[in-house]
Amino acid sequence: MATFNLSSPKHPNSPFVSSNVPSRISPVVAFYPIPKSSFLLSSISLRLRPITIKTESKTKARGSSYVVSALKKLSDADLVTVPPETEAIPGLFPSDAGVYAVYDGNGDLQFVGISRNVAASVLSHRKSVPELCSSVKVGVVDDPERAALTQAWKSWMEEHISATGKVPPGNESGNNTWVRQPPRKKSDLRLTPGRHVQLTVPLEELIDRLVKENKVVAFIKGSRSAPLCGFSQRIVGILESVGVDYESVDVLDEEYNPGLRETLKTYSSWPTFPQVFVNGELVGGCDILTSMYEKGELADVFQK
């Protein structure tokens, strides 16, 4: 008899396997992706096109106009202190797109970023790394497209590297202090370690234990990261929109969930997919959950 070790992140002794498919992480700096700073210092050769930006000679209150001029050098831009009262930040910094440089309390440059809303980015940094976000320089770019923002970012980075010989710590490759990581998606559960392993318990019993050991279980076509039908995609979207912690099982995976589709139909007395269980009981499929979601009734079901 073959033996195997099955585990679930939620229940160490559960007979269900969580597939370990690594998530692809696409770092996003502030509110806009920027190039990685893994380049060699000796290889920098930038040809910058002229950029029209809005700058300010001193701190201005919300609603003030900004003078349009050429992009200031990093060394010439005004250094504005970030107030400890975060509610004051939106009125102190422009909500326009642009390049910005963040300094710590010692006046050392920590990070150069780009954003389509500089004030929102500064606010986010002040909340997440207050000890590193003491003051900021800003250059507001008229053109919010990526190419224009990237050119502005490159010009400030090149100036800093030319003066100091090093990349700001926050822009070094592998530094995630200033990077907003997308949430990692949970792996889909597998009922068996593979069709080649003989089960010691009936598949229907595995299903029963799975739905009773996990608060919310969605049996879908495909994975939660790549649903293979519109109804399954809709269910995943609803569950993630509500913010509920749920487990997902791919009913089309005949390698690790062989026979699941037909066995589940018998177990639930429900002929179609997807199927969503809450506290061991079938709530319904796409139509029912969509109706409950639109009526605002679904959150109450998950709270029971």
Image (cartoon, rainbow, N blue to C red):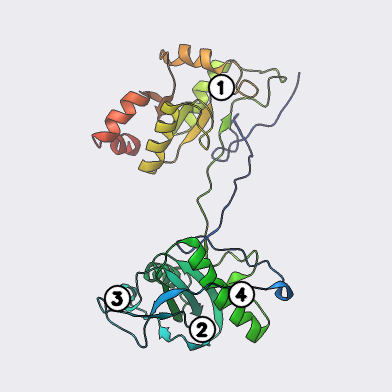
Element under disc 2: loop
Compared to 6, does 115 lie above or below? below
Instruction: Classify mark 1: residues with Cα within 10 Å, few (<14), some (14-19) or many (20+).
Output: some
Badge 3 or badge 2: first in the primary sequence? 2
Tell me which label, 2 or 4, sits earlier in the chain: 2
Marked residue nearer the N-terminal end (2 or 1): 2
**What is the x, y in percent for residue 160?**
60, 81
Query: In the rendered image, which residue does mark 1 sit on?
Result: 252
Q: x%, y% of residue 243?
A: 39, 44
Helix, strand or loop at label 3? It is helix
User: Residue 91 — which label?
Assistant: 3
Using the image, determine if residue 299 lies above or below residue 192.
Answer: below
Residue flagged by tag 4: what amino acid is it? Pro
Q: Which residue is mark 2?
A: 73
Pick the quarter of the image with the N terminus.
Answer: top right
Amino acid at circle 1: Leu
Residue 169's disc is 4
Q: Is residue 280 visible?
A: no
Between 182 and 143, the one nearer to me in the picture:
143
**In front here: 165 or 46?**
46
